[in-house]
Image (spheres, rainbow, N blue to C red):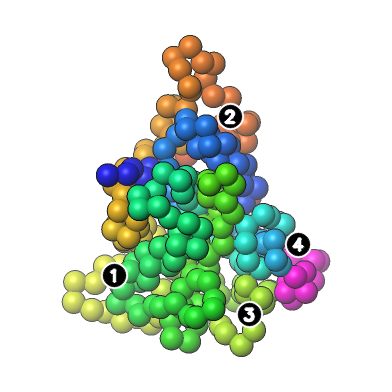
């Protein structure tokens, strides 16, 4: 059975996470790491995909700066979206050529949608696809966004599931460039509902739901990693290789992850 490594990074600033993705994509292309899913949260940030229109950022640059919201132009598909605290972001670094059964770009996105739909169902939240649109929706509102980039068969970027996200931030943009449809979160959809045996809506529990459903949909075995160091440790091509040289900001991130509890880790 194929293997997917999963690493919970806690809260990481967007620029650092972007560099980490770039590093891991190159390692995956060279076969020096296995398929990997990074799970994390970001401080407030707006990203514009390849098809984004600047006009879909409604707020003025000065206002964004006052609120501490960064803006990045990136190479994923899609338009403009927001990432922030309380949102589960997943970055799969996956070689599509090695998936069984063979999976193309469109099917990969559909499988991600299915895993997210099933994860929401674990919490008694009815979610679905909408014809002609990418992402996951409740009957009236969008709960998860998806945007990927594929280079030589290896994926990057991924999905963002609103768990306890402050939805006021989405008023700064036209989410995904789609007008007339609002966004929602798992917290809002639950609305304080309590069902028999219900768990508390915590990020770690949602991660467990998501990864379990990912393994089911993609037919992969899930291996949780303890640290970024454990992910990079096996990346040398041979015992004679010089150990992988991490960019300084990634090295700092790894060191802080190793000494700080998850809830206390943040980079601003």
Evaluate whether residue 181 shows in this view. yes
Tag in front: 3 or 4? 3
Residue bearing the label numbered 2: 246
Is residue 65 highlighted in magenta? yes
Of the image marks 4 and 2, the number of the one nearer the N terminus: 4
In-image side of 267 versus 111 (left or right): right
Q: CA distance from mark 3 to mark 1?
A: 27 Å
- Identity of the residue drawn at 37% across and 64% down: 115
Q: Relative to residue 77, is residue 134 depicted above or below?
A: below
Mark 4–mark 1 distance (CA, rounded to whole Å): 38 Å
Q: Position of residue 78 (x, y in %)?
A: 63, 66
On the image, the x and y values in percent for residue 61 come to 80, 66
Nearest the eye: 156 or 160: 156
Mark 3 touches mark 1? (CB < 8 Å):
no
Name the N-terminal-most of marks 4 and 1.
4
Q: CA distance from mark 2 to mark 1?
A: 38 Å
Q: In the rendering, which numbered label is found on residue 65?
A: 4
Q: Are marks 4 and 2 in contact (CB under 8 Å)?
A: no
Q: Position of residue 225 (x, y in %)?
A: 36, 39
Residue labelled with disc 3: 178
Instruction: Bin the neighbour count of mark 1 within 10 Å (Cα to Cα): few under 14, some 14-19, many 20 and up.
Output: some
Which dot marks residue 122?
A: 1
Magenta stretch, residue numbers: 53-67
- The answer to which of marks 3 and 4 sits earlier in the sequence is 4
**Figure check: 152 above or below 177:** above
| Total residue callouts | 4
């Amino acid at each position: 059975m194929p293997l997917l490594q999963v690493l919970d990074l806690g809260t990481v600033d967007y620029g650092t996470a972007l560099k980490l993705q770039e590093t891991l994509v190159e390692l995956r292309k060279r076969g020096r790491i296995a398929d990997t899913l990074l799970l994390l949260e970001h401080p407030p940030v707006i990203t514009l995909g390849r098809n984004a229109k600047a006009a879909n950022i409604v707020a003025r640059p000065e206002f964004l700066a006052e609120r501490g919201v960064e803006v990045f132009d990136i190479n994923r598909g899609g338009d403009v979206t927001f990432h922030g605290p309380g949102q589960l972001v997943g970055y799969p670094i996956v070689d599509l050529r090695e998936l069984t059964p063979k999976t193309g770009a469109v099917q990969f996105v559909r499988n991600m949608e299915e895993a997210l739909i099933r994860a929401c169902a674990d919490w008694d939240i009815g979610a679905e696809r909408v014809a002609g649109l990418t992402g996951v929706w409740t009957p009236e509102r969008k709960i998860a966004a998806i945007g990927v980039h594929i280079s030589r068969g290896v994926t990057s970027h991924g999905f963002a599931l609103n768990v306890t996200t402050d939805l006021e931030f989405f008023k700064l943009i036209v989410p995904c460039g789609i007008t007339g449809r609002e966004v929602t979160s798992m917290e809002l959809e639950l609305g304080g509902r309590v069902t028999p045996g219900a768990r508390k809506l915590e990020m770690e529990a949602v991660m467990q739901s998501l990864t379990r459903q990912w393994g089911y949909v993609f037919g992969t075995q899930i291996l949780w990693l303890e640290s970024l160091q454990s992910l990079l440790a096996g990346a040398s091509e041979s015992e004679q290789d010089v150990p992988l040289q991490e960019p300084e900001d990634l090295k700092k991130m790894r060191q802080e992850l190793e000494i700080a509890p998850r809830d206390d880790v943040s980079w601003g």
